[in-house]
Image (cartoon, grey):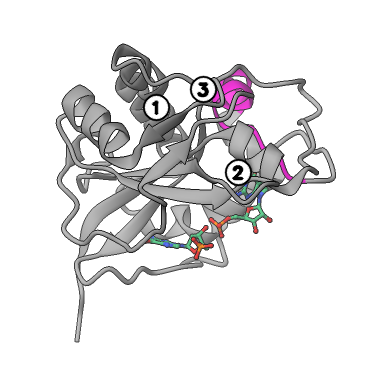
Amino acid sequence: IVYTCHGFDFFYFWPGSLCDAKRACCLPTSGKPATDFGIHGLWPTFNNGSYPANCNANSPFDGSKISDLTKELQVDWPSLTCPSTNSSKFWTHEWVKHGTCSESVLDQHAYFEANLNLKHSINLLGVLQLAGIQPNGKVYSLQSVRGAIKAGTGYTPVIECNLDASNNSQLYQVYLCVDKSGSKLIECPVLPKRKCASFIEFPSF
Ligand code: 5GP
Ligand code: 5GP
């Protein structure tokens, strides 16, 4: 059976939830990123919800191809795992695992540019704040978070939570679907299952 890609899954993560869950996040060597969602990646996905990975061993990450984007990537796509890095290991992982699977549509430069353009045009934190949902440690209903993103972007997101040190469910990742060109949001053909409590914390960063 040959499956076709419906397009992409676009993932963001909230750094505050990564840091207060593990209590061991490490800031990138470029410094503390802005209080904003970070890009996790743009992942080609099949219509049945499965996905291709590691599609071209002959296409390694090449930082020199995206040197014009490095500054922006450090701001919008920081790596917060330990030990501290300049984030390029994270970009390498995402390119090798996911980016190489959509290389016929987006070459390396276009792949990273598409991620940045999506993040800037969606402005997820702004959309949440417009609905009064702030990263201030307060608790919000999952429904209100979903509703705010739907109202602000026009599309239904998938929300993923993790647990903080006191086992409270908190907003960790947000997932939206993107068309085959990597530029326009679409309704997700398949919603992956991700867990959250019905009330979730939005921790500060
Ligand atoms: P987890 O299962 O921890 O959420 O995801 C582990 C990794 O599997 C992700 O970082 C990503 O590389 C891949 N993955 C998980 N869910 C999806 C999905 O729905 N679509 C695609 N394309 N990749 C996914
Ligand atoms: P996935 O396979 O989940 O797309 O990619 C996650 C991998 O990227 C992790 O296994 C980790 O080694 C690496 N990575 C580097 N920095 C980060 C970060 O800030 N957040 C996450 N989730 N993964 C990171």
Q: Which residue is mark 3?
A: 135
Q: CA distance from mark 2 to mark 1?
A: 15 Å
Q: Earlier in the sequence, mark 3 or mark 1?
A: 1
Residue at the bottom extreme? 1
From where the camera sits, is residue 147 visible? Answer: yes
Q: Residue at x 33, y 41 (%)?
A: 142
Q: Position of residue 134 (x, y in %)?
A: 45, 19
Q: Position of residue 64 (x, y in %)?
A: 64, 34
Q: Quadrant of the C terminus?
A: top right
Q: Position of residue 33 (x, y in %)?
A: 66, 21
Q: Which residue is mark 2?
A: 91
Could you say which disc has been placed on residue 119 in the image?
A: 1
Given this view, does label 2 or label 3 mark the residue nearer the observer? Answer: 3
Residue 156 is drawn in which quadrant? top left
Question: What is the magenta range?
Answer: 67-81
**Magenta: predominant secondary structure element?**
helix
Q: Earlier in the sequence, mark 2 or mark 3?
A: 2
Residue 83 located within the stretch drawn in magenta:
no
The residue type indicated by label 3 comes to Pro
